Image: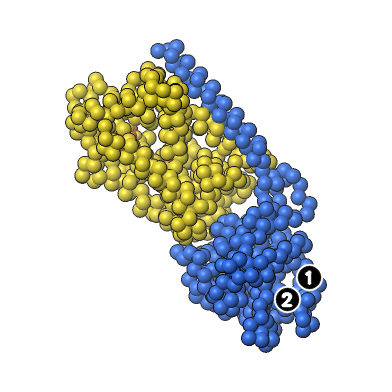
Amino acid sequence: MNPLKNLSVIRKLVQLTTFVFFIYGGFLGSYYLADKVSGALPALHCAYNMDGADLCTLVPFQHQMDHRLGPIIAQGGNLLMGLMPTLITLGTFLLFFVFLNKAFCGWICPVGTFQELLHILGQKLGLRRTGSLDEETVRRTRPVKWAILGLLVFGFPLLTGLGWLNHDMGDPFCRICPSRILSTLAAGDTSQLYVDTATTTTLFWSLVADFLFGLMIAMALTIRLPFCRICPMLALHAVFRKLGLLRLVKNPSPRCGKCGLCAKACPMDIREIHTEMDKHNVTFEDCTLCGRCVEFCPDKDVLQLKYTVFPLFSADPQYFKVRKKAQTEWEKKTLFGNHAQGVKKSGAKPT
Amino acid sequence: MHKRGTPLALLLLCTLTGAPSWAPAQEARPGASQRPPAGGAHPMHQRGPKQFSLANSAGARATLWKPDLGRIPLAIDNGILTLKGTGVDNYHALVIEQDWGYLVESIISYHYMRGKPSGRSTTELTAARKTRLEIVPQPVPREHHQYETGERWGFQVRFDGRPMAAQTLTLETAHGTTLTGISDAEGRIDFTFPDDFPSLIRGERNRTLAAFTLSTRHLAEGTEYISHLQGEYRPNPRHWRSLGLGVAVAGIGFAAGGLLTGFGRARREESA
Ligand code: SF4
Ligand code: SF4
């Protein structure tokens, strides 16, 4: 298969380009906040990386809860004034988000890219990977991202701003975010990988952060996108996903019920993509608009990535055939030579 | 040091309120009031006006440069200068100049202020020529950051907007360190902030700020120019943050991840 006709290859190239751009883009002259691309990027790029081209929207949200909204509520001030910076940040976030929707995850986010690269490494090292997580694990994991968004991005910072929690609770998500460690390490700065003994709170968050970072690396070698499943950005995207111009649509065919290849191809284990028979817009809350389900759907136009009403990429039996073959070939190749390699059970396993 | 025997460093800034700051201790600075730094406050979260005291301020001019390069003249009242917010956020430059005829002295300091988004880059502010002889931070620590001990930061020295090569610069810190360096062909010089905070206890956070002054002098057309860049630096968090432990904990996380995924797979195999 011509790699440039392979959606996954195209996506990887976009991911690598945006990874380099966001991590090292500061050299192009975006050191100060005013020079950043948006200041409210809908993907986890960390503000602690001074060389980066942008920073993720969760940074200003936490900061505004802690230093703006919280204090204004505590002092009985004008609530609207307290909310204004958050509304401006949200507006900026939406301005960008509307264009690509959840594809900020599947195509832009450095943490997503890093996990996918690790997964490729796992495959090339010949590790036995898990095809799809079981339904129960997926079901139990899904609410975690909402809890993190609610508590770590908005709740604790707001309580800190109200004066109920100590200052070190003002940015708890940043304190555990793998992007903080990843983005800075990638830029050659080790200052964010630490155990901080200043207070019990800093000690706690730094232990969680480092543990989570190591955990994510190990898990990503054999499981697809382990951190994404609990990422609060994924939850934030889910809230606004109906506004996005890019979407995943489904025109179910009678064969859908038996096939299910799309669900197996989905790195986020969204089984609903297979079982959903009524909704046209199937951009589910965990979807990253990576397009793998479309690639691995063998039926003409059943799944499509559409930009407003225009199909960008549609399921196609011809494409499916060559793509599947290319995938099998790719998976045979490991650093230890060519051999068929296991992905547990679920069969159609996609990297 | 000064060849005409006049008091040196005719102007001196030290903070009375607001973000803690105090100037390097020096003997020949009459009228200077000094105050040791107060700890704790995050300078970015500082609200309300800051006050500074100025020594020998008669005849001195103070100007506040906004992020959009708009200039506001500030009154110096009995040696006290009050810096109020301008309603826009981002770094502002406080420029104080004193023309003694034979000697022109200036102090520049950068202050982050809160307000409506300025939409302007600090690059514009640093690029603007504010005084004839000027030491320019390249860059100013990004918003919400600070100079830290052990870190290397760049500065450029310019005269009439042009970089000055082979110019001697002196960095003096409130904790008594003096470093000297010479600018390169582009007028650039790097200084590593000395780890000179006294009474740091390993493992304990210290958010104290201390002042530093970077100074240079130049003789042109029979007039001597002295320029200072004043700022604040703080102890490097590495004093209470351990990289080694961080790596170890990440390693434990990695091992746990390996066990978990191995175990998870075994369980799925069983139930399959
Ligand atoms: S869900 Fe994954 S890809 Fe999306 S922002 Fe989070 S880490 Fe990045
Ligand atoms: S549903 Fe499709 S587009 Fe969305 S994450 Fe899964 S495979 Fe990617």
- Check if mark 2's residue and mark 1's residue have beta carbons within 8 Å: yes
> Callout 2, which amino acid?
Ala
Q: In the image, what residue occupies the spot 46% across and 44% down?
A: A44
- Identify the residue under disc 2: B9
Q: Chain of mark 2?
A: B
Chain shown in yellow: A
Q: Which residue is mark 1?
A: B26
> x, y (%) of residue A251?
20, 33
Dot 2, crowdedness within 10 Å: few (<14), some or many (≥20)? many
Which chain, by letter, is blue?
Answer: B
User: Quadrant holding ligand 1?
Assistant: top left
Q: Residue at x 52, y 41 (%)?
A: A182
Q: Residue at x 50, y 20 (%)?
A: B262
Q: Quadrant for residue B190, please give it.
A: bottom right
Q: Is residue A235 above or below residue B119?
A: above
Of B140 and A289, which appears nearest the observer? B140
